[in-house]
Image (spheres, grey):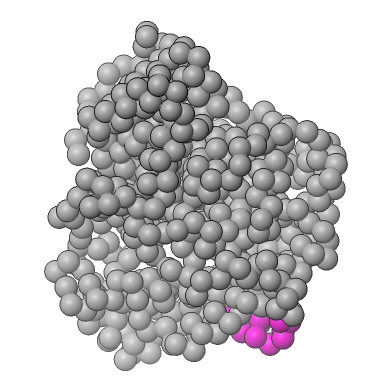
């Protein structure tokens, strides 16, 4: 059932100025941990962009029941 | 009442205990004393509670007894002992949120909305349960899993799930922003319900990510969960009937939800499909193409809003911020650096994802989607790593992978145990429904629970000798 092994996060480095600002607030944060955070974020952002490009927004009336909950 | 008989009370469901209360077979004091004794007997192994208030629990039980004797019946939860995750305010108790930074928190002045609803329903609050720090994570240390105390109970409502699993309370309140009700429910072999986003008032609950935060009940059976949820939403009393499922259509999105899971979990999912079909349900393959994006957008919203919630402490109270755990400090400090455009894109994509889910339900006339709740069973606390899924990822990423997509859509989701793996650890399934059809969701869940034969399955911890372990210091 399982697919071949996949690595979920790409090795990407966070820019130095971001690392500096993060460490100003959390001096214990390591470069490695910050890189890992931003690698996960980059992967998530890329996944969200697949939605942007699909353009599959439905008619608002079609999903009215699903929107009643929205409080944002 | 003898100790053995009192302990046996806790093996009953809420409905059965309630029937006994009204017949006079036992009293709320009997049930509450039994629950307190169960806490005493199990706490040394599972560390599920951060606060137990025997005095107030016994006083509330005595009051419930007086009311029931006078015929003042508040409903199914009247006289039933419950727990509450330590991010909910309970008047008179501190809300420490599992964080050393809040060790000096003063007692809350008022109950959270959900606590007041259960109190109005006559529930007896025993105390507060362990949460991952500020509900941000899936480990819930120092709580442990009743099926194997060397393993984590899941999180962030880990104490609530572990306490329910051993019968130390009949229901408990939890919160679910990325899966924090369903994840520990699955890991501990109990049920959990994440209601429709926005349906329940979160006033008095410490926020994690306000666009995703949901609160709901954890209980041992589908029916107990239904009764606890009913007390929160005040829907009319109806038994969750166990008739056949010939009018039910269930979708199975194999892609994404079965791609990287422990093989036994994939097998348990197929077994659940077979059991539902044997009950008359129609189960159809329904790919959900946006599932990965749904998970991703909820992840981004969660990280940005968590940073916003804690930003003032991080910037203005460095000494207090130093009391936060390492992982959460990083999440907050780094979360501030996520671009606003990424957050706004995630919010916009959420609308599309929600539309796509509504479309999927409409197109296939679905009543529910069936998926595993977790890609693995409970992991070791000493080395919480993910194995046997064919994918290299952190436990935090792996254990929210199958739950978080439904926080993006906001739809109601019921989690229930369906099997044990070869290590005797529970496997949980999710049934994701559509707004307004919660009763049908519980009906499907109850039928599956009965088909699996789970109602009498208990963690091995309960077979340990009933000694008198020393009280865990608080």
**Image quadrant occupied by the C terminus of chain B:** top left
**Viewer-proximal residue, A71 or B102?**
A71
**Viewer-proximal residue, B76 or A53?**
B76
Instruction: Decide if residue B452 is in sight here.
Output: no
Q: Residue at x 70, y 78 (%)?
A: A60
Which residues lie in the magenta part?
Answer: A48-57
Image: B214 above or below B154: below
Q: Residue furthest top?
A: B2
Instruction: Decide if residue B471 is in sight here.
Output: yes
Task: Tell me if residue B289 is in the magenta stretch.
Answer: no
Corner quadrant of residue B134: bottom left
**Image quadrant occupied by the N terminus of chain B:** top left
Give x and y (percent) for residue A72: 50, 75
Image: A43 above or below B34: below
Left or right of B184 in this view: B51 = left
Left or right of B419 in this view: B339 = left
**Viewer-proximal residue, B411 or B392?**
B411
Q: Residue at x 35, y 22 (%)?
A: B66
User: How many callouts does the rendering have?
Assistant: 0
Give x and y (percent) for residue B238: 65, 37
Left or right of B5 in this view: B233 = right
Left or right of B11 in this view: B320 = left
Give x and y (percent) for residue B114: 41, 50
Corner quadrant of residue A37: bottom left
Task: Tell me if residue A54 is in the magenta stretch.
Answer: yes
Q: Residue at x 38, y 89 (%)?
A: A15
Image: B80 above or below B158: above
Image: A61 above or below B253: below
Q: Residue at x 55, y 38 (%)?
A: B227
Give x and y (percent) for residue B168: 39, 30
């Amino acid at each position: 059932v399982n697919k071949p092994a996949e690595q979920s996060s790409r090795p990407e480095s966070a820019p130095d100025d971001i690392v500096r600002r993060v460490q100003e607030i959390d001096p214990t944060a390591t470069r490695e941990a910050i890189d890992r955070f931003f690698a996960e974020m980059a992967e998530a952002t890329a996944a969200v962009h697949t939605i942007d490009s699909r353009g599959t927004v439905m008619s608002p009336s079609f999903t009215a029941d699903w929107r009643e909950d929205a409080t944002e | 009442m003898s100790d053995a008989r009192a302990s046996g009370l806790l093996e009953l469901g809420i409905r059965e205990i309630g029937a006994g209360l009204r017949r006079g077979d036992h009293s709320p004091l009997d049930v509450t004393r039994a629950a307190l004794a169960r806490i005493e007997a199990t706490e040394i192994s599972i560390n599920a509670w951060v606060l137990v208030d025997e005095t107030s629990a016994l006083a509330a039980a005595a009051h419930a007894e007086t009311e029931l004797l006078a015929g003042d019946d508040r409903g199914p939860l009247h006289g039933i002992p419950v727990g509450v995750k330590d991010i909910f305010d309970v008047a008179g108790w501190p809300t420490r949120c599992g964080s050393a930074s809040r060790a000096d928190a003063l007692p809350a002045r008022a109950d959270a909305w959900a606590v007041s609803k259960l109190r109005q329903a006559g529930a007896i609050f025993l105390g507060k349960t362990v949460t991952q720090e500020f509900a941000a994570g899936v480990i819930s240390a120092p709580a442990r899993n009743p099926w194997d105390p060397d393993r984590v109970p899941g999180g962030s409502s880990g104490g609530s799930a572990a306490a329910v699993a051993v019968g130390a309370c009949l229901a408990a309140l939890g919160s679910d922003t990325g899966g924090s009700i369903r994840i520990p429910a699955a890991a501990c072999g109990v049920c959990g319900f994440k209601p429709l986003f926005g349906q329940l008032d979160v006033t008095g609950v410490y926020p994690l990510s306000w666009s995703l935060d949901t609160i709901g009940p954890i209980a041992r059976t589908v029916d107990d969960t239904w009764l606890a949820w009913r007390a929160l939403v005040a829907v009319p009393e109806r038994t969750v009937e166990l008739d056949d499922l010939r009018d039910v259509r269930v979708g199975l999105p194999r892609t994404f939800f079965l791609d990287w899971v422990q093989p036994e979990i994939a097998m348990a999912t197929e077994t659940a499909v077979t059991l539902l079909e044997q009950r008359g349900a129609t189960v159809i393959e329904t790919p959900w193409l946006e599932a990965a994006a749904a998970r991703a957008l909820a992840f981004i919203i969660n990280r940005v809003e968590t940073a916003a919630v804690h930003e003032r402490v991080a910037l203005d109270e460095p000494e207090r911020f130093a009391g936060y755990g390492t992982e959460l400090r990083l999440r907050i400090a780094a979360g501030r650096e996520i671009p606003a455009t990424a957050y706004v894109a995630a919010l916009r994509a959420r609308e599309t994802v929600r539309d796509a889910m509504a479309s999927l339900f409409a197109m296939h006339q679905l009543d529910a989607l069936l998926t595993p709740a977790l890609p693995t069973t409970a992991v070791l606390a000493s080395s919480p790593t993910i194995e046997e899924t064919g994918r290299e990822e952190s436990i935090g990423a792996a254990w929210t992978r199958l739950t978080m997509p439904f926080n993006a859509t906001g739809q109601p989701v019921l989690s229930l145990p369906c099997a044990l793996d070869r290590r005797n650890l529970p496997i949980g399934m999710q049934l994701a429904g559509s707004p307004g059809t919660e009763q049908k969701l519980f009906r499907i869940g109850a039928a599956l629970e009965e088909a699996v034969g789970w109602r009498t399955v208990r963690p091995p911890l309960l077979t340990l000798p009933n000694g008198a372990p020393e009280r865990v210091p608080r």
